[in-house]
Amino acid sequence: MADKYPVEQADLHIPELQELARVLQDGLGENFESVSVNVVDCPDLTQEPFTLAASGICGKSCLADAGGPPYLIPTPQINKTYSIDKIANEVGMPGAFALGAGAGHYQYVGTVAELMPNVQLGSECTHEKNLTHMSKVIPEDDSYKVEKYQSTNCSLMVNLFLSEGKPGKVLEIKASKRKGPENFVTCMRKTLQTKYGDKPVGMGGTFVMEKGKAKIHIMPEFSKTPITSNEDVNNWLKFYEMKAPLIALSVFVSNDPGLDLRVEHSHCFSHHGDGGHYHYDVTPDEVSYLGYYVPAEKIYRVDRPQATHKIGRDD
């Protein structure tokens, strides 16, 4: 963010954690055979299986949605670049713990990449701990590679949950044996949408898909022709089945308060070479999820595209 981009903001509805636990217990129960949602002390998320850059996800918090699919589709605007450090400063949270999902910085990577921000920011754009990963397609054989990413720059779009990274009370969400059509995150988002309507509830956190396999996409090199439909998007993206354990960094909001948001975005990484944009599990009888989430206090819209559309939002 070399320039100062316009920033809009909206307050989010913040239900009590015990209320959220009851609501999500009921909603997830319609989609999974086994569900447990409880308010607990946040475990040390720097430890396995999560391996995050901060021990907790509590304290002051917000969501930030920068850029978006309209900067990728129909043709990429690679001049649209962002710095997670500067976004944190813009929204009044310098030194925050940032996690989420976005696109790697094109010039830094040299190609298109899925980005899994996982960084404890410091002061004056120093990083106390940067455990961010990225995944990219190898064009020679359409294989993929997941590797560490030591920058906080990104291109085109990024969805972030920013917090003080402190211990505290969180929602512990367990779900296994999917019986319904929705993925883990979409089921939570739609449950909150049904309950709270036009009062937006924003959530951020992490989950591990402990067992099973998931459908994951990775963006290949930019399309040589304009993308004009979701069918074009699916024909361009590279899809893979990837195996557990997958560590996901997850952001969603139940309802868009008029900011042209991407309402749901989760990217995952692993320590066995898998990672990318999470769609859904493909082994419903086997799958098992463990997640920790908290509600955010505000949402910030950074550099909202003026020419917009709903293509490629996966929601």
Image (spheres, rainbow, N blue to C red):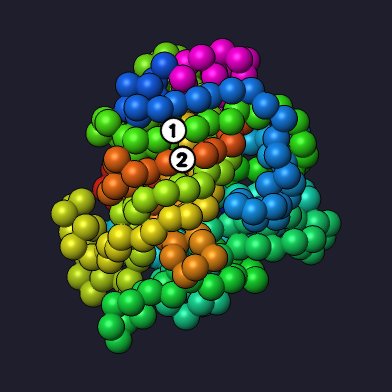
**The residue under label 2 is which amino acid type?**
Tyr
Q: Mark 2 highlights which residue?
A: 289
Q: Earlier in the sequence, mark 2 or mark 1?
A: 1
Q: Which residue is drawn at the image coordinates 73% and 44% (left, top)?
A: 44
Q: Residue at left 70%, top 39%? A: 43
Density class for disc 2 (Cα within 10 Å; few <14, some 14-19, many ≥20) is: many
Q: Is there any visible trace of residue 99 in the rendered image?
A: yes
* 261 lies left or right of 131: left
Quadrant assignment for the C terminus: top left
In the image: residue 264, left or right of residue 220 = right
User: Where are the magenta residues, as a range?
Assistant: 10-25
Instruction: Locate residue 194, reporting x and y percent.
Output: 37, 17
Quadrant of residue 224 within the rendered picture = bottom left
User: Where is residue 292 drawn, in percent x and y?
Assistant: 59, 36
Depth check: give the residue in front, 212 or 195.
Answer: 212
Q: Do the residues under discs 2 and 1 have CB atoms within 8 angstroms? A: yes
**Residue 41 place in picture, x, y as percent:** 72, 30
Q: Dividing the image into 4 quarters, which one contains the N terminus? A: bottom right
Vertical position of residue 205 compared to residue 271: above or below: above
Tell me which corner region of the image, top left, top right, bottom left or bottom right, holds residue 182: top left
Say which residue label 1 marks: 175
**From mark 2 to mark 1, how far is it between C-alphas?**
5 Å
